Image: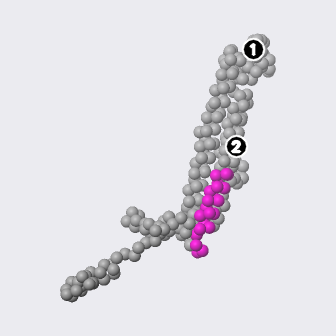
Amino acid sequence: MVACAGRPWLAALLLGLFVACATSRPAVEDAESPAPSNAAATSVTTVPTSASGAPIPEYTDPPSELVAAYMRSCDHRVRIDDDEYTGETFDECDFIEFDQNCAPDPSGCWNEGEGCKSRCKLPCKDCQRACAASCGECRSACATGDDNCVRHCAQLRASCRDGCMEAFGECTGPECSAVASACYETFDARKEETCPDCAAIGACLGSAYEHSDDATGWCKTKFPTANRECFDWCHDW
């Protein structure tokens, strides 16, 4: 202000500008404060979670039955009623659609495929347990009475469960079908090498009952040099 001596109007002008700038200048933010969310980028009201500060939706619609169950407990497990065949109720990671093969399985490939499906159960259950643990961690960060936060954790739990069941479906479906197909290919190659007359032996076994009650015994007389297993492997079941 010394430089403005003799010019009181200039001093008054500078003082007025300083006051105006001081009152309109935004407060300096703490360097560790999270950046404000871009309200224009979303159409939902958002609130930060207490764990990470990431925004979560403000839910206004009622939760689905599954999400409501996860809001009550992250450990909730979906169960399936198998009324048509067994009348039992299964954990969804234990439930495999009923399939039946009444024919003999000389290749063992049917059992191999079914065994593959059974082996899919444990990874599914491990996945579900991991989802429940993650949900529990999420809920532990929610403030008491913050139903919206609990709802958000339940939504994530439901999405995680969907991932588990998608993987389970891939395992019991395409992956185990590929296992069975590979088994049949190996068996067919072995059968072709072991039983070069397989087609003829199969035809014999199919018509032998017209000649004898012992189809295998009768065909063995027709193919005396054939390997013993060919009379099991070549039957057209």
From the image, which quarter does the C terminus lie in?
top right
- 6, above or below 30, in the image: below
Q: Residue 12: image x %, image y %? A: 24, 86
From the image, which quarter does the N terminus lie in?
bottom left
Could you tell which of marks 1 and 2 lies nearer the N-terminus?
A: 2
Residue 50: image tag: none
Tag 2: residue type?
Answer: Ser
Stretch of the chain drawn in magenta? 125-145
- Classify residue 21 by image quadrant: bottom left
Q: Nearer the viewer, residue 56 or 12?
A: 12
Circle 2 sits in a helix, a strand or a loop, which is it?
Answer: helix
Left or right relative to 141: residue 221: right
Residue at the image point whose x is 80% and y is 17% from the top: 217
- Magenta stretch, main secondary structure class: helix
Q: Residue 87: image x %, image y %? A: 71, 52
Q: Nearer the viewer, residue 25 or 5?
A: 5
Residue at the image point whose x is 63% and y is 30% from the top: 182
Q: Nearer the viewer, residue 181 or 129?
A: 129
The residue labelled by disc 2 is 118
Residue at the image point whose x is 60% and y is 47% from the top: 167
Residue 226: image tag: 1
